[in-house]
Amino acid sequence: MTAIANAAQDPGATRIVSVSGMAGSLVRSVVHSTVLRRTRIALRVPTQLGWTVMGTGAAAGVLGWFLAWTELRMIALFCVVLMVYAGLYTFGKADLEVDVDVETPWVDRKEKATVKVDVVAKNRLRGGASLEVPIAVGRQRPEVKTPPLGSLSRGALKTVDLSEFIPTAKRGVVAIGPVQTVRGDPIGLLRRPMSLAERKELVVKPDTVVIASLGAGMLKDLEGKATNERSASDVSFHSLRDYVPGDDLRHVHAVTSARFGKPMVRQFVDTRTAHLSIVVSGAEAEYGSEQEFEDAISIAGSIAVRGVDDDQRVAVLAAGQHTPTRSRQSRSLILDPFARAEFGAGLALVAGSRRMKRLVPDTSIAVLVTGGRAGEMELRKGARVFGPDVRCIAIQVKAGSDIDVARARRLLVVSVPSLGGFGTIGSIFGKGWS
């Protein structure tokens, strides 16, 4: 009662008691969770056969003790010997350094990927250890490869080649790892995995086709492409002409003016670029099949690669996978979101257009790619999101249809049956956008 009265009179003491109580409960919860985690790990060490042997040995020992059966006691002793034998192989520190070497983080589809695992033994490793390397493509269930390590002397290096196990037949992201070493006995009673290396990724790029240049674009940019339009001031020098009253005197060419005896001024041409935004619908309802989606990804990837080759600024939103505009881009970087895109994931065409408009408000050219089930209204709505000053092209992949190109005001609608069909009309971009 006195302690309660003192606590009531001193609010600071009450807070101290409260904080200490919270700290104590936190410590207890951490210790409890650690004990539970270690217990779960220990219970996973015996295999199903190991639990059977331990259960048989325990039952035989109890019955042999109470019934005085020598045979049962011998069975129990034999089970104990087996478990001790298995423990000698399994327990102990496997002091290894493991490094997963992915030679190239991006590969083309059907290209062989070079992936190796280097294992260095810091101490002598007895036989019975093997590697476990989970390999998964996208959301698929990992396929575990278990190359044996064998016995390794101290300081020995062993390289395990995983190239033949890496699937590159389909575009996507191949997850390799995390690599584990598994120590166990020859009988298979105990099995102890230990993680040694983090997960690595290998990106399988989609197929692309070569298309014509996208042109110089519409945005004036000092680092853009030269056009045929004359300009009074730029960085791309074109020619000299006679001075006209009102010309900027800073552009008078002194040497040529002295030679001809009259003022001559520099004539420039505009340098322009484009901010290209590419949106690929991820809605399953807008595609007739998964193959239409794959062709849509490849078509959009082809346009993105062409934009990078033309030194344009390119932003991508492919089935929810976004890559921001960078000052310096490469083919592999721009194809990365296309490789990661998954059928049925991400936003529909109109919603994706709205998101791209928020991400890249200064878009000058918008490319909208979708499947054959998307209606004309969705194409128009997606184009209207970017406003009247943005040139838009909508590409529909309709399996089995004919190639068709139609223009509705500032919207160019292209229908193609496949990636191959798109490659035959790729020249429309350079002609229609410059």
Image (cartoon, rainbow, N blue to C red):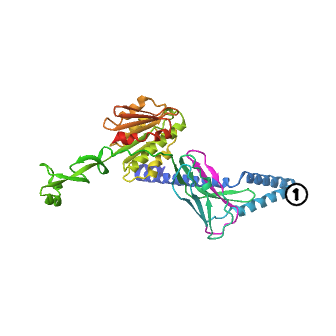
- Specify the amino acid type for callout 1: Thr
Q: Position of residue 87 (x, y in %)?
A: 72, 61
Quadrant for the C terminus, please.
top left
Please state which of residues 188 and 320 is positioned toward the viewer in this rendering.
320
Residue reaching furthest to the front: 260
Q: Is residue 97 within the magenta segment?
A: no
Please state which of residues 170 and 135 is positioned toward the viewer in this rendering.
170
In the image, which residues are magenta? 121-146
Q: Is residue 249 above or below residue 356?
A: below
Write down the residue under mark 1: 70
Q: Position of residue 143 (x, y in %)?
A: 63, 49
Corner quadrant of residue 69: bottom right
Crowd band around label 1 with a 10 angstrom C-alpha radius: few (<14), some (14–19), many (20+): few
Q: Is residue 278 above or below residue 408?
A: below
Residue reaching furthest to the bottom: 154
Who's the residue at 70% across and 54% down the image?
Answer: 46
Dot 1 falls on a residue whose secondary structure is helix
Q: Is residue 296 above or below residue 225?
A: above
Q: Is residue 123 within the magenta segment?
A: yes
Q: Position of residue 141 (x, y in %)?
A: 61, 46
Who's the residue at 47% across and 45% down the image?
Answer: 209
Please state which of residues 151 and 109 is positioned toward the viewer in this rendering.
109
Who's the residue at 36% across and 48% down the image?
Answer: 312
Q: Position of residue 102 (x, y in %)?
A: 54, 58
Q: Is residue 291 above or below residue 3?
A: above
Residue 371 visible? The answer is yes
